[in-house]
Each structure stands twice: as C-alpha cells, then as structure tokens.
Image: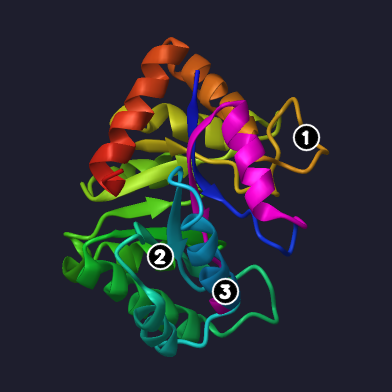
C-alpha cells in the first residue's frame, strides 16, 4: 500500500542530500509528499526541491515563532508560483517566551492566510498553546471560503466539535496520536469524521509508536494511518482511499 504524507521537512538542515532521501522514501511506500516551509530560507529551498520530482508538492510559509507580521505575506507573494498547493506552516505559538508577541503572530498568520485566500489554496496551521485565539481568527466571515488544515492537531474533542461547525476546517493527525499518553487526542480523533481528516509525519519530528526515539521519516506515516484506522474501526485500505479522496478534494492533487 502507498501513502501520502501531507507534512514533512526534508531540508538540508537535516539531510546532506534531500533529493536522494525523498527518492528513497518514495521507493519505500510513498505516493506523495507535501514539503512544508517554516522560514523564508526553507520555503525557497523546498520550491527548488519539489521541481525535481513530481511526487512532491510545495507548501510555503513562515512559522509563527519566526514571523515578522504583515511582511510575511508580502514575501510569500514574491516567491509563490503555480506549483504551490498551500501556505504553511503558519499560525500561533505561545509556548516560548522569546517568540514574537501575540499581536505580531496574529498579523503574520492573517497576512499569510490572505495569500492562501487570494490564490485559492489551503492554509496549513501550526497552533500551539493558542487554540482559542486561533479559533477567533479562523471563524471570521472573511475566511469562510478558505480551506484550513490544522497541522499535527493537538486539541481535545470539545475543540473538534466546535471546529466541525466550520465546514472549511480539516484536521491533520501526526504520530502523536499513537503515543500511550495521548488519550485526549485519541478521543478527539474519534470525533473527527473521516472526510475531514489527513495524516502526516512532521518529519524529522514526532516519530510514531513503534518508532519513537528514532528520527522520523515520511514512510512512518503508515503507522499513523493504521493506528487511526483501528481507532475508527475501518479497514486499512478503506481508510487509505478516504485520505486520498480528501487530499484530492482539499488540495487538488
């Protein structure tokens, strides 16, 4: 069975030869990989990488801990091309004391969401310790036609229920769901309809059980697919086909 990883970071920061690495992953069990930016530098890097193989798709964006505010949107407009399928990972991260202020992060998030809106592509969100502030933004009328995906979703089942009232919001689940101490997330995933769900690795982070402690790689997304299929009580092939259909519907690939 082949799999799609909608969030991975095979950058020179982590690998001597990213193209060789992604080709090895593709030969293993991958159908597609969405290469996701976190900075100006790696957003430029990934655009070049994705041109070298048709199974990679670029998502460009500035992470909230690196945002400078509204100028992030202006920058993305200077590098975006027709191959880009999303803007991410963008959002809010209040975890670290040395991150930009909440106000600057909100400016950066909104500016980049507006890029996604203008180009008719997906906004992929990184939200950490900021779920309520994020909801206030994504629920605004101006973003009702924007497809929004929570990357490595971390909310609970009550947050899921609230977001499900917004028909344009989707949830991408990482290997965290396989952890023994992730009971709250597992309960949240039970609430998410199959039609509103994706799977990802966030490589090289968050390796799923049984690969915890190792650097994550995109082929390990298989473990997350299978864990969620078991959690939802559906067979592996049916779940895989549903995720593929979701990706076609939301990302257009």
- For discs 3 and 2, the disc positioned in front in the rendered view: 3
Whichever of callouts 1 and 2 sits on the residue coming sooner in the sequence is 2
What's drawn in magenta, residue-wise? Answer: 15-40
Residue 145 falls left or right of residue 149:
left
On the image, the x and y values in percent for residue 40 come to 54, 78
Q: Nearer the viewer, residue 165 or 85?
A: 85
- Which residue position is annotated with label 2? 134
Quarter of the image that includes the C terminus: top left
Are there few (<14), some (14-19), or many (20+) residues within 10 Å of tag 2?
some
Q: Nearer the viewer, residue 13 or 110?
A: 13
Are there few (<14), some (14-19), or many (20+) residues within 10 Å of tag 3?
many
Count numbered badges in the picture: 3
On the image, the x and y values in percent for residue 29 come to 57, 26
Would residue 164 be counted in the magenta stretch? no
Is residue 93 something that shows in the picture? no
Residue 120 vertical position relative to residue 72 in the rendered view, above or below: above
Q: Quadrant of residue 65?
A: bottom right
State the SS at label 1: loop
- For discs 1 and 3, the disc positioned in front in the rendered view: 3
On the image, the x and y values in percent for residue 39 come to 57, 74
- Mark number for residue 39? 3
Q: Nearer the viewer, residue 117 or 154?
A: 117
State the SS at label 2: helix
- Mark number for residue 212? 1
Would residue 32 be counted in the magenta stretch? yes
Is residue 229 something that shows in the picture? yes
Tell me which residue sits at (51%, 88%) in the image. Answer: 68
């Amino acid at each position: 069975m082949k799999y799609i990883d909608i969030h991975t970071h095979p950058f020179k920061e982590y690998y001597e030869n990213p193209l060789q690495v992604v080709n090895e992953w593709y030969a293993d069990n991958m159908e597609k990989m969405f290469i996701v930016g976190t900075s100006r530098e790696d957003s430029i890097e990934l655009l070049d990488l994705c041109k070298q193989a048709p199974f990679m798709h670029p998502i460009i964006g500035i992470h909230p801990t690196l945002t400078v505010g509204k100028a992030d949107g202006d920058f993305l407009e200077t590098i975006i091309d027709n191959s880009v399928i999303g803007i991410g990972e963008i959002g809010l991260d209040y975890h670290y004391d040395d991150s930009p202020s909440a106000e600057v992060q909100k400016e950066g998030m909104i500016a980049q969401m507006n890029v996604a809106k203008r180009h008719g592509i997906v906004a992929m969100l990184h939200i950490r310790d900021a779920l309520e502030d994020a909801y206030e933004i994504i629920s605004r009328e101006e973003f009702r036609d924007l497809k929004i995906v929570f990357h490595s979703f971390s909310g609970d089942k009550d947050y899921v229920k609230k977001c499900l009232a917004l028909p344009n919001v989707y949830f991408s689940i990482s290997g965290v769901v396989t952890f023994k101490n992730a009971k709250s997330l597992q309960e949240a995933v039970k609430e998410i309809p199959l039609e509103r769900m994706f799977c990802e690795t966030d490589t090289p982070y968050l390796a799923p059980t049984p690969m915890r402690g190792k650097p994550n790689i995109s082929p390990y997304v298989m473990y997350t697919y299978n864990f969620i299929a078991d959690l939802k009580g559906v067979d592996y092939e049916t779940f895989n086909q549903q995720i593929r259909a979701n990706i076609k519907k939301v990302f257009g690939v």
